[in-house]
Image: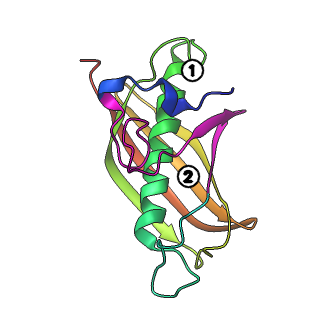
Amino acid sequence: MEKAIQDFYPDEFAHCYGCGHKNEHGHRIKSFLEGDETVCHYKPEPFYTGGFPDKMYGGLIASLIDCHGAATASAARVISEGFKIGEKPAPRFVTASLKVDYLKPTPMDATLELRGKAVEIKDRKIVVHVTLSAKGIVTAKGEVILVQLPEK
């Protein structure tokens, strides 16, 4: 897939700071389907440091897990309805709960890899597990509970 899941968000729901393609000041992360998981690669800007100049700010980690989780939920919903990504607008989700475990300090000098998987799909609710890795080491993991927005 050449286009990211976020590229299929309807314009009226594409303003998120983390993942909205309509927010020119945001992170604009891009998540792609890879087998039964989603993957996102992100290189942090040097000003996203935490308490140490070579370690990443935890709020950015939470934001990345949150937004990648939303893209994962969107892809899972499309697939559960029997479609392929891009065959219809990607449904949007809002976060009902976000739990992040910070396992190790995340280095600033690495391209991060986020991997997500929908582990529970219900009517409007999808639960997603996400890992964040740097240099091949999982440094954070999260569980995101998302609720689908109405189409209008």
Q: Residues within 10 Å of mark 1 (few under 14, many from 20)?
A: few
- As helix, strand or loop, the secondary structure at mark 2 comes to strand
Residue drawn 45% across the image and 23% down it: 90
Residue 120 showing in the rendered view: no
Label number found at residue 130: 2
Residue drawn 43% across the image and 61% down it: 62
Residue 92 position by quadrant? top left
Our reading of the magenta stretch's main secondary structure is loop
Label number found at residue 79: 1
Which three-letter amino acid code belongs to the residue tagged 1? Ile
Number of marks in the rendered image:
2
Residue drawn 42% across the image and 57% down it: 63
Which three-letter amino acid code belongs to the residue tagged 2? Val
Image coordinates of residue 42 in percent, x first then y, are 60, 55
Name the colouring of the figure: rainbow
Image coordinates of residue 124 in percent, x first then y, are 34, 28
Q: Is residue 147 above or below residue 17?
A: above
Residue bounds of the magenta highlight? 13-42
Outermost residue on the bottom side: it is 52
